[in-house]
Image: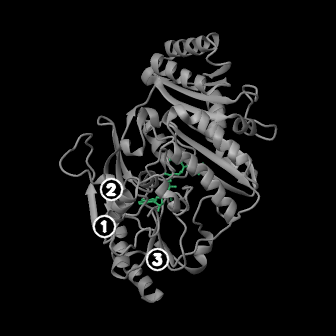
Amino acid sequence: MPINSIISLFKEVLDNSSILLGEDLKSRFYHIWKTDISLESLCLLLPRSSEEVSAVVKICNDNNQEIVIHGGLTNLVGSTISTKTQVVVSLEKMNKIIEIDEKGKTITCESGVIIEDIINVVKDKDLLLPLNFGARGSAQIGGAVSTNAGGLRVFKYGMTRNLVLGIEAVLPDGTVISSLKKLMKDNSGYDLKQLFIGSEGTLGIVTKVVLRLYRLPKTRFTSLAVTNNYQNVLNLLKIMEDRVSSNLTGYELLWNDTYKQMVGDKTLYNKYLPDNYKYYVFIEYMGGDFENDYTHFESIILDCIDRRVIDDAVIGKDDKEQVNIWGIREDVAVLADERDFDQQFDISIPVPLIGEVIDKISLELKDCKGVKTIFPFGHVADGNIHFIIGKDSDDDDLKSKINDIIYDNTQLVAGSISAEHGIGLDKKKYLIKSRSEDEIELMRLIKKSIDPKNILNPGRVI
Ligand SMILES: Cc1cc2nc3c(=O)[nH]c(=O)nc-3n(C[C@H](O)[C@H](O)[C@H](O)COP(=O)(O)OP(=O)(O)OC[C@H]3O[C@@H](n4cnc5c(N)ncnc54)[C@H](O)[C@@H]3O)c2cc1C
């Protein structure tokens, strides 16, 4: 269909301010960091309601028009890149909070609400949305649901999937599937919301969600502890699980090079502990009894030092100290700026094997000509380790060599090539290293039956 004809159809269902074309597209981007590359698209649509999303999607389906969905544009797998012939649908104007149910501990909102806004609004009601990751100030809840985002509290609260009670989504033919129930248990037939969680916008556009909330813990303490031995990272975790139990909400790890770079002379972060240890563990404790919780937490940390499980530690008690300590972990994304080009990874490895596998990968990467910096870090308690690898060139051979080192080693221990970021466009070629042919075939079958014309986020995942 000629461009003008499909635009005139969009004009019948959206007002002019919700349709961006031509020159206006130059001020829009496909990724939050790539703000020097303008968006390529036929047009960008900004619907304000589920009805508008449905009308737009129906027009596209009727006219075999491909759509790329934009949330907060923080994904790290090339998911939101588009071409001149594709229509971009952004959810950013669907940013209303519909209801906070304080008694039932749920929030219902549109999918374009920024995650941090949800965290703040429920905090005022003494409730907690435990989703916590570096991009929370830009990522939208619809993006988090569509990628099944993880983050820093997964081993305690689970992935986004564990927080979603209800979903409304628009199917590729424009049908609105709405199940905004607030139930924790519902075994009445297939759990259809799971189709849209983690499928990266290939099966539907998420327009509304109901999320499960928790009571806001009254206390929060943080410790940064060091050791040179991976077995002690595991020993410390076991002690924390035994003695702190459900109050343990975060357990993160930075390797030496990563810590050293984060607290180096040129950065804003305090060097709380010397930079000559191999492992830096970040521990988050949340509870309900300020004086006793602190004493308890401190006594465990001191005991671990006495027993030489850890070599040294600091504890952050007030908010400012904790923000500063966690900044070293949460802001690691700045390390991508160390070189002109970078590759980022989020692999899953069985927890007991992490020490040796990361050592092996790091050695192989050091031998790889063209690799300049290697920064491993991650959510060690749930087996998810990230790498930011810096390079001075974007050469395809080098890219493949780095991918092979990481993914072959991951496959050797039956790990996953994506613990949380998803597959997008960038990792599609490597999906076979994590999933069997039969599994991928079943994914294709599901995609084909829900989106037979392949109009929604085409080419992503499979
Ligand atoms: C600094 C930084 C730290 C990060 N840390 C983590 C982390 O710890 N854990 C983690 O899991 N991820 C992390 N990420 C990755 C990213 O933030 C998540 O994948 C996030 O969930 C993406 O949300 P978004 O709104 O930005 O989605 P986008 O990037 O806009 O889109 C992601 C995918 O979802 C689709 N999509 C978006 N909205 C919708 C919708 N409403 N309906 C259907 N499909 C949709 C898009 O088409 C795309 O395929 C990090 C990213 C950065 C930049």
Residue type, numbered disc 1: Ile
Name the image quarter holding residue 62. bottom left
Earlier residue among tags 1 and 2: 2
Label ID, residue 450: 1
- Where 109 falls versus 352 (above or below)? below
Q: Position of residue 226 (x, y in %)?
A: 66, 24
Q: Position of residue 453 (x, y in %)?
A: 35, 76
Mark 3 element type: helix
Identify the mark at residue 302; answer none if there is no mark: none
Q: Are marks 1 and 3 in contact (CB under 8 Å)?
A: no
Badge 1 vs badge 2, beta-carbon distance below 8 Å: yes
Reading the image, the residue beneath label 2 is 195
Tell me the CA gap for discs 2 and 3: 33 Å
Reading the image, the residue beneath label 3 is 16
Left or right of residue 427: residue 65: left
Residues under labels 1 and 3: Cα distance? Answer: 30 Å
Disc 3 crowd rating (10 Å Cα; few below 14, some 14-19, many 20+) is few
Tell me which amino acid carries mark 2. Answer: Leu
Left or right? Give the position of 178 relative to 280.
left
User: Residue at the right extreme?
Assistant: 265
Numbered marks: total: 3
As rendered, which of 115 and 147 lies closer to the eye? 147
Amino acid type, callout 3:
Asn
